[in-house]
Image (cartoon, grey):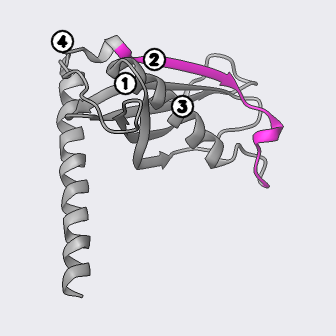
Amino acid sequence: MAARTPSYSRIELATLTSRAQANLLGNIHGGEVVKLADSTAGVVAQRHSGGPAVTAALDEMAFLEPVRVGDIIRTFGQVNWVGTSSMEIGVRIETEPWDAAGEVRHVGSAYFVFVAVDAAGRGRPVPALEPESAEDQRRHREAGIRRAHRLARRQEIEAGRVSG
């Protein structure tokens, strides 16, 4: 299976926000933003793996600023790291206010773990990742750190269950 670069599956999605997505404060509900980020990550994972992939974990989601009703919301996704069947997908979320064309704000970031699956729902191999740029290499290195932290946290929790 040939390795793939981050640009092979990189994607940008955009949509206009509406009142139906608003919370009681009049901003777009955080769950709507997570859903859009997850959809973006899913497309990236499917492209990189060449078939179905499912969300296994949301490792981190940072909401930096509120998204307002009427804003154009853009998500940018790319593969940061791959294992045997799993992939970390980074998603950057930006908005362009409806009343200030051209003013772009970084409003959130997320890191998803996806697993490529076969027809029976079992993990299947994914192509290796070949970072293309210094930025891709940085993302790959940081994704490895996040993975190590996830695994260490899981081991610590499991050890506490056995001894406690």
Q: Residue at x 52, y 35 (%)?
A: 37
Nearer the viewer's eye, disc 3 or disc 2? Answer: 3
Secondary structure category for the residue under label 1: strand
Closer to the N terminus: mark 4 or mark 3? 4
Distance between the Cα atoms at labels 3 and 2?
11 Å
Nearer the viewer's eye, disc 4 or disc 3? Answer: 4
Please state which amino acid type lies under the numbered disc 4. Ala
Secondary structure category for the residue under label 2: strand
Residue toward you, 74 or 119: 119
Please state which amino acid type lies under the numbered disc 2. Ile
Q: Is residue 117 magenta?
A: no
Q: Is residue 19 magenta?
A: yes
Whether residue 106 sits left or right of residue 78 in the image: it is right
* Magenta region: 9-24
| Residue 106 can be seen, yes or no | no
Q: Which residue is mark 3?
A: 39
Nearer the viewer's eye, disc 4 or disc 2? Answer: 4
Please state which amino acid type lies under the numbered disc 1. Gln
| Residue contact between numbered discs 3 and 2, judged by CB atoms under 8 Å | no
Distance between the Cα atoms at labels 4 and 2?
20 Å
Please state which amino acid type lies under the numbered disc 3. Ser
Quarter of the image with the N terminus is top left
Whether residue 145 sits left or right of residue 58 in the image: it is left
Residue 113 in the image: state x and y as whole percent. Answer: 35, 41
Number of numbered callouts drawn: 4
Q: Which residue is mark 4?
A: 2
